[in-house]
Image (cartoon, rainbow, N blue to C red):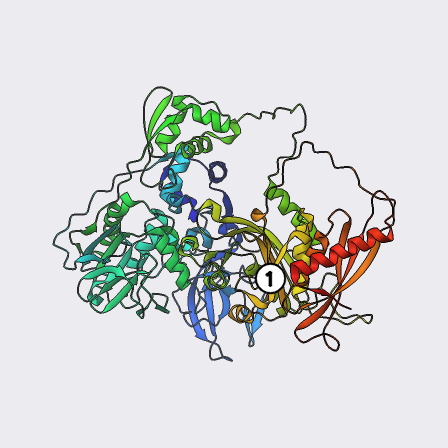
Amino acid sequence: MKFSLSWLKEHLSGDADLVAVTDALTRIGLEVEDVEDKAGALSDFVVGHVLEANRHPNADKLQVCRVDVGKAEPLQVVCGAPNARAGLKVVFAAPGTVIPSSGVKLGASEIRGVASAGMLCSARELGLSEEHEGILELPSDAVVGKPFAPTVGLDDPVIEIAVTPNRPDCLGVHGVARDLAAAEIGELKDHPLPPVRGGYPCPVNVCFDFGDTPPLSPLFALRMVRGVKNGPSPEWLQRKLRSIGQKPINALVDVTNYLTFDRARPLHVFDAAKVKGDLVVRRGRTGESFVALDGKTYELDDTMGVIADDSGVESLAGVMGGDATGCDASTTDVLIESALWEPVNIARTGRALNIHSDARHRFERGVDPAFTIPGLELATKLILEICGGEASEIIVAGEVPERDLIIDFPVSEVKRLTGLAVTPAEVKAPLSLLGFWVSGQGETLKVAVPSWRPDVEGKADIVEEVVRITGLDRVEATPLPQAASLASAKLSPVQRRARTARRTLAARGMVEAVTWSFVSRAQAEAFGGGKPEIALANPIAADLSDMRPSLLPGLLAAAQRNADRGTGDVALFEVGQTFLGDRPEDQRMSAAGVRRGTAKARGAGRHWGEQALSVDAFDAKGDALGVLAALGVSPSAVQIAQGSAPAWFHPGRSAALQLGPKVVLGAFGELHPRTLNALGLSGPLVGFELTLDAFPHPKAKPTRAKPPFEGSALQPLTRDFAFLVDRDVPAAELMRAAQAADRKLITRVDLFDRYEGAGVPEGKISLALAVTLQPREKTLTDAEIDETASRIVAQVEKSTGATLRG
């Protein structure tokens, strides 16, 4: 938000200087980002008067001008501007002057054989605008030889402040002045706005037509002014707009732009002669389009609010007007519109069409509903004063929304939340100056919130207003009480699991990524999401429209971005929240990882010592089981349920991880080719995802001491078993069955061979297991070893139907 100091003083009485104003603005939360003082940069430029302009003898497009710059003799200046002519008041730069736009220091020169003692400057060369079609023309009453900047009001400092989204009232100079007045920097000039009497009924009617859909506007006011004379706006108005970087267009448009920045009240003017029939405020229709004032054609749909007449859409409501009904020099009758629009819809429309106008910037944050009609009256008054004409009566569709919010405010709340002790009088004074209505004398006050403060909803908001105006410097520094002892760790089980998962995956050579919690609708639907309840009402971008149902879309997109930039062998992981619905229990903590290219756990890329292999489902399985083991879940207790993985995994190269039929811990595998195509990804890509909330809670232990180490001085021994089993029996079932034969004695079961072919019956495979026995108390005898081996064979045959291979 920009404004000049003199503009601010039009709303604020007093003699506060620039330093006092800027210090107060930052102190009350309107941080000053920049103070632009053009007078210093333009101090060497003076007003000149072109006495003669003759054709250059050696160049058709150049003129030789005699310019009076207030010295004893006129100077000779060569100029190529097409508008250079005798009698013109111009901006002159003498040799030695630095041009602001280029930083070039002028010197005396000779152009095509003719000496030139300076330069006549354009607006772009002075850094005032992009206009470069000719030299800048000054008013005829400009005094020759005087400094240029004060002549045109550029000695007025321009202040730029950062306005947070919750303070739409400070997107107007009047609102900024109100805050400064509350901070005792002058007094607010808040004069009443008398209505402009209408001399005839408005010939154009307006109505709402939203059907059964929610309305996008609660209030629309309109009036006609006929007989106007449009043209350049007065110098005072042009000067204000130029000071904040706005280009003056014509008087009618400049008035609406002025009120946008002066009162945070966007309006729009239609050329009444170009409006066909009455105005209808409705939703757009799919397939409709219109040409906006910026000259671009926009395609509309039924989520966007529009203002239409009998010929079609004439304005994109609250965002930008249409070119077909724009005002120009031929305009004689105008329709002035002042309306309210639904903020979220304005934000969504502007984002969908990539339009960021000053009107959208204010409407999407919320304008003062009570100023809708007064804003129309003020615009009418200015147009009548500048352009003449006769105003009609105002017609109104809808009504001003009332916000009867009265808060019972205990004065002690300021002390409780901020530590600042204040009296009731110290609460009432700043609130009253800010426009709040305050009643009561005791320790509890009744506070009514003004219409221009949509951000104030409760007691904490009022505390913030009191403290920021009273001053944070009044809050006394109080040391925190020193604890008698350090507090014990208070991490929840899920937090501990998340920390352990991060460390485990990082130790496996994966790099942690932090991706958006939002994904596109297509990505959400591809990974089991896309429900309406978790779609964002006001997304920051079209491809970040839904809460993520899984961590995998973000990781896969990150892996692809790396591959697109030449780093295809990446292993990424993330631990974060996922969202399946809008209930608290639908928010999950997950851990996920993806591997691409040759990024296996032992390393990536080609090496002379071994063959470089692409990642496969077993790499993702190893990552998932590594996390499970670190979290205290024995991999031998986990069931690998092939065919039960979600649909975004390859059906034959993936599996779910379960503890029994009901507790699903997650899944791993290759990504389905359909998923890769839908998201524009290239493989090979494998991944896993675990739901940390699904892990069973550990049983409470009587002591936090670690159990004693159960080592054995006796040497372990290994026995190998080869079983013939049906091809569709998972090897994990054989391994679990072997382990179950004697859980105390058998400490490890490994699969070391798989064979099918000659010597193995059709439909069968040979699986070889290495079973490790660890005696604890004494060395096993041959008979004890044989007995254990028999139990292993029997258990495997009973559980899987396998037979010992001869």
- Rendering quarter of residue 718: bottom right
Residue 761 as seen in the image, left or right of residue 121: right
Residue at left offset 11%, top offset 54% = 200
Classify mark 1: helix, strand or loop: strand
Please state if 620 lies on the left or on the right of 64 as rendered. right
Q: Is residue 780 above or below residue 203?
A: above
Image: 277 above or below 213? below
> Where residue 296 appears, x then y in whole percent?
37, 69
The residue lying at 65 percent from left, 49 percent from top is 501
Q: Is 567 on the left-hand or right-hand side of 165?
A: right
Question: What's under tag 1, amino acid-wise?
Answer: Ala
Q: Is residue 309 above or below residue 224?
A: below
Residue under numbered circle 1: 655
Quarter of the figure with residue 388 = bottom left
Residue 297 spot, x, y in % from top left: 36, 70
Q: Nearer the viewer, residue 343 or 33?
A: 343
